[in-house]
Amino acid sequence: FSTGNLASLSSFELTSTYRLMTRYDPFAMMLLLVCKNMVAWMAVVTPFMAFMQNTGQAAMSLTALTFVYSDSMALHFFFWVQHTGSWKEIGHSISRFAITNLLILVILMLSALGRLLLGSEKRKSKE
């Protein structure tokens, strides 16, 4: 999906956006790349939410479990943040920590969007 190394936020490959844009506009190109990545993530989240809905399990329970794993990864990367060494090593350690923290927000947003797309809000039937 042209993301390259996710450990670095500046490693996105822009060549896939040249087919859609004729001039160099970094903000629009980044928006295209983010949308392209969101489609791929939604292709994973929506079937997961449909599976959870069909089995009758609470989707937020597994989302909360994912939060626990993400928090433990964030804590792990927090202790790996370096303040000595080359700028590249320092930047990689900080970006790993930041990406892991942003992952928590992305998971919450994607699970809410998946529920919205599936219409999994239970409607109360009139008796």
Image: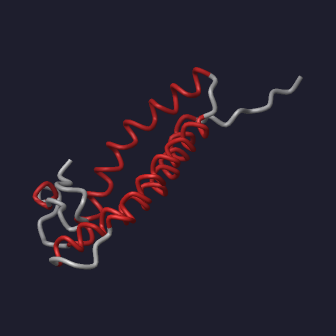
- The percent position of residue 80, horizontal first and vertical second, equals 32, 64
Q: Quadrant of residue 91?
A: bottom left
Q: Residue at x 42, y 55 (%)?
A: 103
* Left or right, residue 66 beside residue 54: left
Q: How far across and down, in percent of the image, does residue 50 sit?
A: 52, 28
Q: Nearer the viewer, residue 71 or 11?
A: 71
Q: How is the image coloured?
A: secondary structure
In percent of the image, x 46 and y 35: which residue is there?
46
Give the answer, above or below, for where 64 lies relative to 13: above
Please name the residue shown 47% across and 47% down the image: 110
**Which quadrant, please, contains the C terminus?**
top right
For residue 35, above or below residue 64: below
From the top left corner, tell me how far across and down residue 111 is, in percent: 52, 44
Residue 86 lies, in percent from the top left, at 15, 77
Nearest the viewer among 67 and 78 is 78
Q: Is residue 1 above or below residue 101?
A: above
Q: How many marks?
A: 0
Give the answer, above or below, for where 96 lies relative to 121. below
The foreground one among 26 and 95 is 95
**In which image quadrant can residue 55 be found?**
top right
